[in-house]
């Protein structure tokens, strides 16, 4: 990865209802941080866009801290244009509250109804603005359901998002969240690479190897 600028988002966004409450998700940021850390160790210039990480920020990377999906969109849009490889490993909320109260919402005896709006799909946004020679990569957490398997959903998502590769995580039964290891399938136009269960830093190396191989095709 020597000489390459990689931009990685990690963690999970928080969408605020008021100054003390938010809609969040279970992403710890471990896999995204492992990607950033391994890329830096392999000689890349790394920009890590970090959303509410549960793990320490690795040394040797440039960090932009964000909390919300809107801040993530701004930070990624700023960093991505100079990136050779851009990876959306963060869990971005698909929906955010229409209104965020400036003061704490007090208990009133009537349960509030929260209206949500769709957030910008940052991965699709970055894919649509990809420059020649740039590789844009997404993650997909899938459980599989009546309409398709984990892999089928991953392939459909690769097409829908318009990115170059998708790292598909099987999240059935707590397999990935917060864990120190992971099992993924890297899906792209050049095929599928399954990486069996191993520590997240080794998964990160396998992802970088697959992306470098794809860039050389
Ligand atoms: N993502 C993003 N912006 C969003 C939501 C998701 O960039 N507002 C990115 C994530 O960082 C990840 C990928 O999209 O790389 C995962 O998408 P996901 O939310 O699983 O896809 P959806 O299109 O919402 O599909 P699903 O119906 O499975 O939720």
Image (spheres, rainbow, N blue to C red):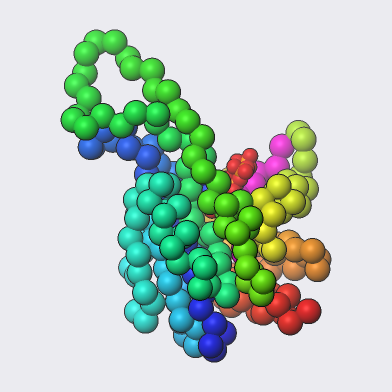
Given residues 198 and 37, the one toward you in this image is: 37
Residue range in magenta is 136-145
- Identity of the residue drawn at 70% across and 77% down: 215
- Mark yes or no: residue 180 visible: no
In the image, residue 72 above or below residue 194: above
Q: Is residue 107 left or right of residue 214?
A: left
Given residues 147 and 36, the one toward you in this image is: 36
- Identity of the residue drawn at 68% across and 67% down: 196
Q: Mainly helix, strand or loop, the magenta region?
A: strand
In the rendered image, the quadrant that contains the N terminus is bottom right
Q: Examine the image and state in which quarter residue 206 appears.
A: bottom right
Q: Is residue 95 magenta?
A: no
Given residues 80 and 199, the one toward you in this image is: 80
Q: Examine the image and state in which quarter residue 78 appears.
A: bottom left
In the rendered image, the quadrant that contains the C terminus is bottom right
In the image, residue 69 above or below residue 202: above
Q: Position of residue 56 (x, y in %)?
A: 33, 68
- Identity of the residue drawn at 55% across and 67% down: 86
């Amino acid at each position: 990865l020597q000489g390459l600028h990689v931009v990685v988002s990690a963690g999970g966004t928080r969408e605020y209802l008021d100054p003390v409450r938010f809609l969040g998700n279970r992403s710890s940021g471990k896999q995204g941080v492992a990607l950033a850390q391994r890329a830096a160790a392999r000689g890349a210039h790394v920009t890590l866009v970090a959303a509410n990480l549960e793990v320490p920020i690795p040394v040797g990377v440039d960090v932009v801290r964000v909390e919300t999906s809107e801040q993530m969109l701004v930070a990624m849009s700023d960093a991505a244009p100079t990136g050779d490889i851009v990876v959306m490993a963060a869990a971005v909320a698909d929906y955010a509250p229409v209104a965020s109260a400036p003061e704490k919402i007090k208990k009133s005896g009537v349960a509030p109804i929260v209206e949500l709006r769709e957030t910008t799909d940052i991965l699709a946004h970055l894919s649509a603005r990809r420059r020649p020679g740039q590789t844009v990569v997404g993650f997909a957490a899938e459980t599989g359901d009546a309409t398709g398997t984990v892999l089928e959903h991953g392939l459909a998502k690769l097409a829908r998002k318009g990115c170059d590769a998708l790292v598909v995580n099987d999240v059935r039964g707590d397999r990935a969240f917060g864990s120190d290891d992971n099992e993924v399938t890297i899906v792209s136009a050049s095929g599928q690479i399954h990486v069996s269960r191993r520590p997240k830093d080794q998964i990160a190396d396998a992802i970088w190897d697959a992306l470098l191989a794809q860039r050389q095709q």
